[in-house]
Image (spheres, coloured by chain):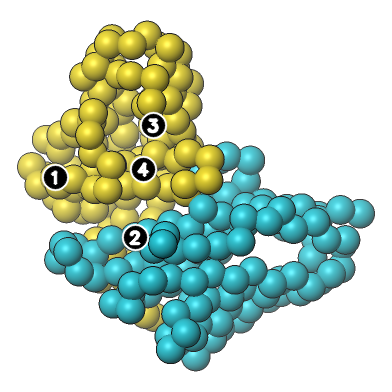
Chain colours: A cyan, B yellow
Amino acid sequence: RKEVEQDPGPFNVPEGATVAFNCTYSNSASQSFFWYRQDCRKEPKLLMSVYSSGNEDGRFTAQLNRASQYISLLIRDSKLSDSATYLCVVNTIGGTSYGKLTFGQGTILTVHP
Amino acid sequence: EAQVTQNPRYLITVTGKKLTVTCSQNMNHEYMSWYRQDPGLGLRQIYYSMNVEVTDKGDVPEGYKVSRKEKRNFPLILESPSPNQTSLYFCASSLYPPSLALDGKRNTIYFGEGSWLTVV
């Protein structure tokens, strides 16, 4: 089983739609969580951190369920510019004192007119 | 401007010909790492470095070497490249190691633009 699993998609949605991505992680020692965005095989860029109480940044809402080891990202009112690959990233302490970031394979989103 | 710079961005090379991909950051970050990205596998860590002269293996270190002689530079060395090392490579840096990026504390990871490497 992969340490971090995402539905690879692709998700094809019209402008204005609401879309949700899910991510599960296998290591219960994981401590912090992030969503990154990657455009056309360019470098990943931080979209948002995911906090225990859930958090929102404009049209984006991230939630964390530690009991189920599950992270989600909700995008409301999708824009064409939201088309990208969304990477779920989990930070796990253990094995090395420096921690380790594990990346999901990414979920592809295409927003069409 | 804060940035991580990798070179070369694109390279086609032949099996067995040693090559080095350079990485430099201008943010005085302590933690640097190298990843490779392959279809369906996500980003996998090759090596990381906590500070000067401190390096350690990541998840897929076989066939690679690194060095950290200066804080700003973290080159990736392929002593004898093979076709299975054809991939997209990213260098990354952050102020702290992941262990300090606890919930609520931002520790932004800066990635280089990536290096497309093809070994034939």
Kindly identify which residue carries mark 3: B6
Chain under numbered label 3: B
Q: CA distance from mark 4 to mark 3?
A: 12 Å
Mark 1 touches mark 3? (CB < 8 Å): no
At mark 2, the secondary structure is strand
Please name the amino acid that badge 3 sits on: Gln
Mark 4 touches mark 2? (CB < 8 Å): no
At mark 3, the secondary structure is strand
Same chain shared by disc 1 and disc 3: yes
Kindly identify which residue carries mark 1: B55
Residue with the most extreme right position: A113
Chain under numbered label 2: A
Kindly identify which residue carries mark 4: B35
Please name the amino acid that badge 4 sits on: Tyr
Residue A11 in percent (x, y) is at 74, 58
Q: CA distance from mark 4 to mark 2?
A: 11 Å
Chain under numbered label 4: B
At mark 1, the secondary structure is strand
The numbered mark, 4 or 3, whose residue comes first in the sequence reads: 3
Residue A59 in percent (x, y) is at 71, 74
Residue placed most toward the observer, B33 or B25: B33
Kindly identify which residue carries mark 2: A101
